[in-house]
Amino acid sequence: MSTTLSTELLLHRAGTKSYWRGLTYREAVLSLRVHSRHVAARVRGGDEDAYAVQLSWSGTHLVGACSCPHGSEGFFCKHCVAVGLVLLDRGETVPPPDAEDVELKDVLRTLPPEVLRELLYEQAAGDPELRARIMSSR
């Protein structure tokens, strides 16, 4: 699989219901910015709240994150679909992952859990934000 954004990929990631609902949310995309490794957007929800949406690649897997209730449960929601469709409408895409990021993920997959824990502990001991993220994910 490649890192090519398409309507078929959005349908596959979201499922039929969220995909079709996302089609009607293209006009609700309030802002959209393509960064070097991800796309960030704000999308107005049906309740008039604005949700933060981010699209990126994890290897060859399209990842969507949204602050809406459905997205907060880990689902690729209609807001993620809307952002992807607006990107396609504009002739833009989600930036592909850095070759170094892919290589790092490959190496991390091969490390034993105890090595990963020690590396993460060392990093979190000197990074209060990372430490807080770890502590809040219990």
Image: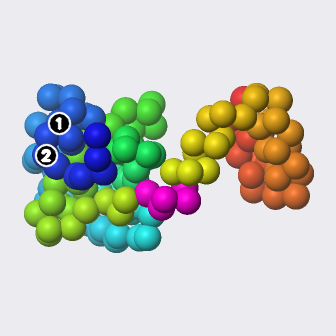
Q: Is residue 81 above or below residue 114?
A: below
Could you tell me residue 67's position as x and y percent?
43, 46
Q: Can residue 89 be seen from the camera position used here?
A: yes
Q: Main secondary structure of the magenta part?
A: helix
> Which amino acid, by three-letter code, is at mark 1?
Leu
Q: Residues within 10 Å of mark 2 (few under 14, many from 20)?
A: few
Q: Whole-Å distance between the Cαs marked 2 and 1?
A: 6 Å
Residue drawn where x is 34% and y is 71% of the image:
33
Q: Is residue 51 above or below residue 21?
A: below
Q: Quadrant of the C terminus?
A: top right
Could you tell me residue 102's position as x and y percent?
51, 51
The residue identified by callout 1 is 11
Residue drawn where x is 37% and y is 41% of the image:
61
Task: Judge from the rendering whether residue 27 lies leftward or rightward of residue 54; answer left or right.
Answer: left
Could you tell me residue 107's position as x and y percent?
64, 43
The residue identified by callout 2 is 7
Mark 1 lies on a secondary structure that is helix
The one nearer the camera, 46 or 68, is 68
> Which amino acid, by three-letter code, is at mark 2?
Thr
Examine the image and state in which quarter residue 96 appears: bottom left
Count of numbered circles in the view: 2
The one nearer the camera, 131 or 6, is 6
Q: Can residue 48 be seen from the camera position used here?
A: no
Q: Is residue 118 above or below residue 40?
A: above
Q: Which residues are magenta?
A: 97-101
